[in-house]
Image (cartoon, coloured by chain):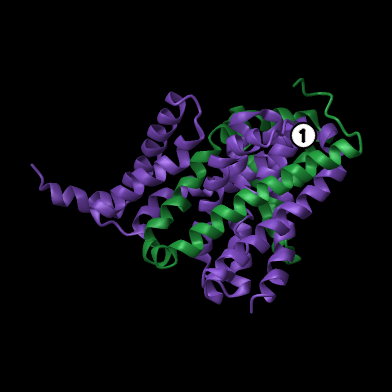
Chain colours: A purple, B green
Amino acid sequence: MTDPLLIWSYLESGPLLWLTATLVAYWIGDRIFRLSRGKPWFNPVLLSVIVLGTLLLATGTPYETYFEGAQFVHFMLGPATVSLALPLHANLRRVRKAALPMALALLAGSLTAVVSALGLAWLLGADFGLLASLAPKSATAPVAIGISEKLGGDPAMTAVLVLMTGMIGAIAVTPMLNALGLRDWRGRGFATGVAAHGVGTARALQVNPTAGAFAGIGMGMNAVLTGLLAPLVLQLFR
Amino acid sequence: MPAIVSGIITLLLFQLCGEVISRMFSLPLPGPVLAMVAMVIGMALSERLLALIRPVASFLLQNLSLLFVPVGVGAVARLSDLSAHALAIGVSLIGSTLLAICVGALTFEHVARLTGNVDEEEEA
């Protein structure tokens, strides 16, 4: 029989192991989420990240090795973003009708996200590098990373902050907006997409199809607006 | 050729064009978002395009959460940076995200109500 260490070193050098692990971790996370009947605390992304993170730490595997396998999953983000055209098309008439509330909610939500994120972090002593990484965190990951680079932030850090933002939004949105008594699924979804991009949109799709469609639009629109707002607001903290 | 393959090809071609145009004119919009807008226009013009995309797009959107896992695991690689600024990052992310969602949703609902913009397609 071959030495298990040899098998391990073979597995570690290829994408098979961590690609499989990513899918299995997600399957477990999704199972738990479903068993909890969609309780927001059991967010499937958060659960899978915890499982995989623990596994990486326990086996001493560097993130780069992990990502070699996980990149195939990561790559599908692009085509999935294009796919958001599907719910958008199905709701086009309602979207056009809601143009004014959407425009104002976009401006208010996007500005609130950038100003409050930088203000709070600055008050708690964050340095300029961290502020620059933090400024675009409500935009979708590929956009946020590009903005962070331009502002002098750390793009890899920004990617993590973006994801954490999305998970916080996905977990909090339903109980919070229920408590506020907001019933318009268009506005609920749209605000979620603006503040919590794709992870929030994924959550909105789980809760209500209308919310999902409007979240996709919110995400797309805030990708553009954050590119304009983040550099301006960051200037205030220089 | 199986329909699913033509669907994937179409999605990738749209994304490819989006990336090229976004880079060519250094637009603030990323390629996939540009491709999404083009796809909505395409779907409005062609029933065939809509039918072609629907199976693949539905599949991807049903599993959208999965696609964020690889970036999320990146937090492990940044644990020391994250814990060094844990308080600032934690308060800033939680505070700003919750505030932004509330402000956005409240703004939408108030403006919609003031302008009599009700959503008659949604039965409450």
Percent x, y for residue A28? 38, 33
Which corner quadrant of the image does residue B22 belong to? bottom right
Say which of A150 and A78 sits in front.
A150
Decide if residue A65 is on the left or right side of residue A99: left
Numbered disc 1: secondary structure: helix
Location of residue A53 in the rendering, given as x and y in whole percent from the top left corner? 35, 50
x and y, in percent, of residue A30 in the image = 44, 32
Subunit that carries the residue with mark 1:
A
Residue, far right: B115
* Residue type marked 1: His
Question: Few, some or many C-alpha atoms within 10 Å of disc 1 (few <14, some 14-19, many ≥20)?
Answer: many
The residue at the far left in this view is A1
Name the residue rendered at 71%, 27% in the picture.
B51
In the picture provided, is A76 more to the left or to the right than A58? right
Residue B105, above or below A123: above
What residue is rendered at 75% in x and 38% in y?
A: A187
Q: Looking at the rendering, in which quadrant would you find the N terminus of chain B? A: top right
Q: Residue at x 75, y 32 (%)?
A: A184
Residue B102 occupies quadrant: top right
Whether A14 is drawn above or below A46: the answer is below
Would you say residue A143 is visible in this rendering?
A: yes
The image quarter in which residue A85 lies: top right
Looking at the image, which residue is at 40% across and 46% down? Answer: A49
Place of residue B95 in the rendered image (x, y in percent of width and height, measured from the top left):
58, 54
Mark 1 highlights which residue?
A89
Residue A98 can be seen in this image? no
Q: Is residue A29 left or right of residue A214?
A: left
Would you place residue A86 above or below residue A118 in this image? above
